């Protein structure tokens, strides 16, 4: 483990600007963030006062004071910067100075430092229009994105691919300078006659406008050779910009798209259903969920590793992540979910798939316990796990699954039973399907006084709701009672197991 360095060990100024783990750094950064917020408020307030009023002059003086503080902060940040490789080799004093200056220059050219520099340049009256650039300093604010900060990812892409970006910029700038210089040498001596280009700066400007296909038309080549140069520059610009666009797309696109990992976490979804794990074999599960929940039902989030598969319906939200890692479960707002379904992986052996399922269930429960969500919730999150090997059912329940579905055993049992009792498999399939006579578990109707006999409860539900009661779930019983005796007493708090077109009230499972 890397030892934590104190402010005394690294220097108070260096720690204040480059050591996030120190107390002095947090104090200084808190003050800087307060100044950034205040400076943005000053800009906003300037739009609501008269330009020459005493209030406007006061705001300008305060703004200048803030900019001077920013300048001091910028200088201290640069001066206190310690190049990482400075103490790696023995160097002469002259080499150390040159190495330190070179590395500090490179540090000043980093994106965040360039933003800070542009902010303090507004102290010059002619550059006062750069005041708006201080809005970019909010990039130094505390992290808004917990899992995948796109700004940090973009900076990392620039740093890791700086040679590629330098090559692309060299191609664009080289073509611009060469085109502008050529046109100036051709038409510059004829400027009085053609009234086009009178300086090298105008030639560079024309080349930049031409190569980027903007085409303002303020400068137009007047000679035949100048137009040939313009045509060559246009054609070469297509290839040059295509090369540069390819570099940008390959290096920055993935960094920017990482913000999708934060999209659901920052949303306001509640009572949604999280499906952990997905492969093409689970496609029928999605159709069943759509049929059960309906088009206007709760949001269903598919949480699995990789990009969204092409066959996933648009009604489902896809979040890339690993459900076996607690650090990633906040992406899907698990603490606000109503239920979680853990799907077995059919691409591996059943024992491996069940081990992954059990680990996922344990991770879900551990996450809710550590976050305190389990204790705060009025209704606990319902976890359903798919097990492929019957030997692992007890392990899944021990890990925290409320219900365990043995899909392989269930299918084989239906196949075997249909041989002895033909037609039963089709009936069970209808019972499991949506929008048919399905199996439900609900509280006893409030108008029915309990305790009462099972026969009375069954008769009441049949007459009032058209439901066929086939069992009970009494408080304290380890298992549900199916087809109990008519005289069996149904105590308060019991739930009834019944067949119906839809649940009549307070459906639990």
Image: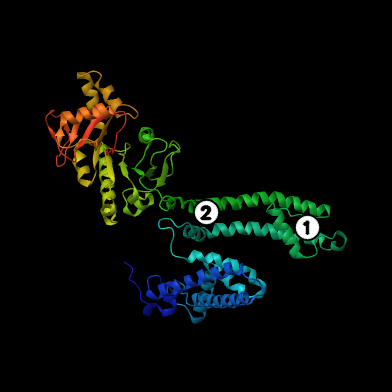
Q: Is residue 397 above or below residue 251?
A: above
Residue 320 percent location from the top left of the image: 40, 47
Quadrant including the N terminus: bottom left
Residue where numbered disc 2 is placed = 252
- Image-based side of 364 in relation to 269, left or right: left
**How many neighbours does mark 2 have within 10 angstroms: few (below 14), some (14-19), or many (20 or more)?**
some
Query: Secondary structure beneath disc 1?
Result: loop
Residue at image coords 71%, 50%: 234
Q: Quadrant of residue 490?
A: top left
- Foreground: 89 or 437? 437
Q: Is residue 389 above or below residue 189?
A: above
Decide if residue 85 is in sight here. no
Upstream in sequence: badge 2 or badge 1: 1
* Residue furthest to the bottom: 93
Residue where numbered disc 1 is placed = 219
Decide if residue 415 is in sight here. yes
**How many neighbours does mark 1 have within 10 angstroms: few (below 14), some (14-19), or many (20 or more)?**
some
Residue 34 percent location from the top left of the image: 48, 71
- Image-based side of 224 in relation to 451, left or right: right
Q: Quadrant of residue 464?
A: top left
- Foreground: 58 or 400? 58
Residue 137 percent location from the top left of the image: 52, 66
Q: Is residue 371 above or below residue 303?
A: below
* Residue furthest to the right: 193
Query: Marks 2 and 1, Cα distance to the nearest angstrom?
Result: 34 Å
């Amino acid at each position: 483990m890397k030892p934590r360095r104190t402010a005394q060990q690294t220097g108070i100024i260096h720690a204040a600007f480059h050591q996030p783990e120190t107390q002095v750094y947090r104090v200084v950064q808190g003050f800087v963030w307060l100044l950034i917020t205040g400076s943005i408020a000053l800009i906003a307030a300037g739009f609501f006062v008269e330009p020459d009023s005493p209030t406007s002059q006061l705001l300008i003086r305060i703004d200048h004071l803030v900019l001077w503080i920013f300048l001091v902060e910028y200088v201290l940040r640069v001066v206190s910067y310690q190049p990482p490789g400075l103490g790696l080799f023995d160097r002469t004093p002259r080499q150390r100075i040159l190495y330190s200056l070179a590395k500090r220059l490179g540090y000043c050219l980093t994106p965040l430092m360039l933003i800070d520099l542009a902010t303090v340049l507004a102290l010059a009256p002619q550059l006062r229009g750069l005041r708006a650039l201080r809005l970019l300093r909010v990039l130094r604010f505390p992290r808004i994105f917990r899992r995948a900060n796109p700004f940090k990812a973009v900076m990392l892409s620039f740093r890791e691919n700086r040679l590629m970006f330098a090559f692309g910029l060299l191609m664009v700038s080289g073509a611009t300078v060469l085109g502008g210089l050529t046109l100036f040498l051709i038409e510059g001596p004829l400027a009085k006659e053609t009234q086009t280009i009178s300086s090298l700066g105008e030639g560079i400007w024309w080349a930049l406008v031409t190569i980027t296909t903007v085409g303002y038309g303020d400068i137009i080549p007047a000679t035949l050779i100048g137009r040939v140069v313009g045509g060559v520059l246009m054609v070469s610009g297509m290839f040059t910009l295509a090369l540069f666009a390819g570099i940008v797309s390959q290096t920055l696109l993935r960094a920017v798209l990482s913000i999708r990992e934060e999209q659901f976490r920052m949303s306001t979804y509640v009572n949604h259903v999280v499906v952990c794990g997905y492969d093409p074999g689970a496609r029928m599960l999605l159709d069943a969920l759509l049929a059960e929940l309906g088009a206007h039902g709760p949001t269903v989030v598919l949480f699995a590793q990789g990009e969204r598969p092409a066959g996933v319906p648009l009604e489902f939200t896809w979040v890339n992540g690993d459900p076996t890692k607690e650090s990633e479960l906040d992406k899907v707002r698990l603490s606000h979910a109503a239920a979680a379904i853990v799907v077995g992986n059919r691409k591996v052996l059943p024992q491996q798939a069940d081990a992954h399922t059990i680990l996922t269930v344990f991770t879900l429960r551990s996450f809710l316990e550590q976050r305190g969500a389990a204790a705060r919730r009025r209704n606990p999150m319902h976890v359903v796990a798919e097990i492929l090997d019957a030997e692992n059912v007890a392990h899944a329940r021990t890990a925290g699954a409320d219900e365990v579905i043995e899909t392989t055993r269930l299918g084989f049992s239906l196949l075997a039973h249909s041989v002895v009792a033909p037609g039963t498999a089709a009936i069970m399939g209808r019972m499991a399907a949506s929008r048919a006579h399905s199996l439900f578990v609900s509280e006893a109707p409030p108008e029915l006084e309990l305790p009462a006999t099972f026969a009375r409860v069954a008769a009441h539900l049949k007459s009032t709701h058209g439901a066929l009661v086939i069992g009970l779930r009494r408080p304290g019983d380890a298992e549900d009672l199916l087809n109990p005796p008519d005289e069996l007493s149904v105590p308060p708090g019991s739930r009834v197991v019944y067949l119906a077109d839809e649940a009549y009230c307070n459906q639990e499972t």
